[in-house]
Image: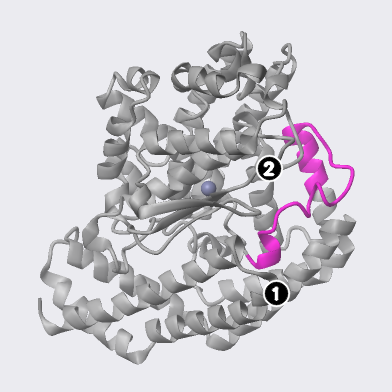
Amino acid sequence: MDDTFKNLESVFGEIIDLRRAAALLEWDERVCMPEGGVQAHGDMLATVRRLEHEKFTSRETGELLSEAKERVKGLDRDSDLHRLVTVAARDYDKATRVPAAFVSEQAQTVSAAHHAWVEARSKSDFSIFRPHLQKVVDLKRRYVAFFPEVEQPYDALLDDFEPGMKTSEVQEIFDTLGSRQVTLVQSLVDRPQIDDTVLTLPYAEKDIWDFGVEIMTSFGFDWARGRQDKSAHPFATSAGPGDVRVTTRFDASQPFGLLFGTLHETGHALYEQGLGSRWSRSLLEGGVSLGVHESQSRLWENLVGRSLPFWECFFPRLQKRFPAQLDGVTPRQFYRAVNKVEPSLIRVEADEATYNLHVMLRVELEIALLGGEITVADLPEAWNGRMKSYVGVVPDGDAKGVLQDIHWAIGLFGYFATYTIGNVISVQLWDACHGVEPSLDDQIRRGEFSTLLAWLRTRVHEHGRKYQPQEVVERATGARIDPEPYLRYLDRKFREIYGF
Ligand code: ZN
């Protein structure tokens, strides 16, 4: 390797070290920091992030990248080196277009907005948050202006989370999903409802935790390269493929939330643990996009963890742990209970049939806000109107409506769509894997996941950020991101469960 690439490798290595350090500081803050550490943690994180940003956007990095771009010109466009330089140059271009003064102004605005949102939500009063949200939206408009080449303004926001994805593609996905999911949900609510009281009986936290650990292990989570802890909001993070951490939480009123949270975050973790060693500590480390990441968590949580073959294997084991609660219950009854469809107000608690509708509402509002078709003041009403027509329920206050998510308060616009993109991709991957491994359901019925994990490893995990999201999906499934398989999956599953 010549000097340019060697130097670049060492610069990227240090940048990744700083990003990993920031990830571990954030983990510490959310998992085990004593209250007195708030100030020191805030200072440390700000410093580490600033050093990382300065290093990455430095003239030295820019010059190395320009040289590297020249050197890779003769190489195969799909070669590792060509891809690495292309992705790095793209990241560099994005990072250097946004002035440092804008970044710090945004950090301050968002910090105040977050504070106001916490108060507004606790009082269920949008007016407290409104002026702050206006400032956040104004900032987003200014951010978009740094990328004048985009077709639609919203493309610039989406691209930060789903590289290469266009607003028009997202709108097409929702055009296909929206009305058909609304129709499906309407026919489901007309059916006799499933009794899921078995899920709300008292269960000991430790026993559910241990059951979750048993499943994580059989999924293939490597405990020598990861750990699980508790936090207020479950998340997964990593300091490279050798140190991947997940968290979960326990709420006695929904004891199985701990289990499904565990399965979800384990899906994220398996992706991070599966990164090819050649990309570790390089700029191609990590997941390619939030959508592809979410496809992994939803696949393990829902396509595996809410399937009948899975519960045929694991329900008897659960029953053994909880004989008092589960005596006389069949695997099928339990399977139906964990798949109950109930239109509700809160996205994070939504079932598979309604989830995308919650997302669609948010994406539509974001696009309309950015384009000026609605104002910040219109939001609560616009929210409630869409909730009524898409999900069929209306919140009795802002806390359970427009104020429920943290995203806008911390400046995340363009993020929500990735939840639906993840759902859509998860089924495409699932179908493709079934196509080449017809005995997959039988394997799951025996509690064996190694074939599924190996397939995901070679098709998705090991490539890190080498390919763009659309390419990952095309290479793995032969098709571009397409919502039809997801709709077929929902239809088949819920018609069978609800018997129509
Ligand atoms: Zn997730």
Q: Is residue 66 magenta?
A: no
Left or right: 222 in relation to 354:
left
Question: How far apart are the two marked residues, 1 and 2, measured between alpha carbons?
Answer: 24 Å
Residue 135 appears in the picture as rendered:
yes
Q: Mark 1 or mark 2: which comes first in sequence?
A: 1
Q: Tag 2: Cα neighbours inside 10 Å, few (<14), some, or many (≥20)? A: some
Nearest the eye: 382 or 440: 440
State the mark number for residue 347: 2
Residue type highlighted by circle 1: Ser
- Which residue in the structure is indicated by mark 1? 111
Instruction: Give the x, y percent position of residue 174.
Output: 58, 40
Q: Could you tell me which secondary element the residue under label 1 belongs to?
A: helix
Q: Is residue 151 left or right of residue 359?
A: left
The quadrant holding residue 277 is bottom left
Kind of residue at badge 2:
Arg
From the viewer's perspective, is residue 431 above or below residue 402? above
In the image, the segment drawn in magenta is 383-411
Q: Please name the residue shown 37% across and 48% down the image.
A: 223
Residue drawn at x 21%, y 61% as measured from the top left? 278
Q: Pick whichever, 7 or 489, lies toward us.
A: 7
Mark 1 CB near ligand 1 (8 Å cut) = no
Residue 213 horizontal/vertical position (percent): 47, 39
Image quadrant for the C terminus? top right
Question: Which residue occupies 31% across, 90% down?
Answer: 60
Say whether marks 1 and 2 touch (CB < 8 Å).
no
Number of numbered discs overlaid on the protein picture: 2
374 sits to left or right of 448: right
Image quadrant assignment for residue 347? top right
Viewed as shown, does residue 321 lie left or right of 136?
left
Residue 486 versus residue 396 in the image, above or below = above
Q: How is the image coloured?
A: one colour
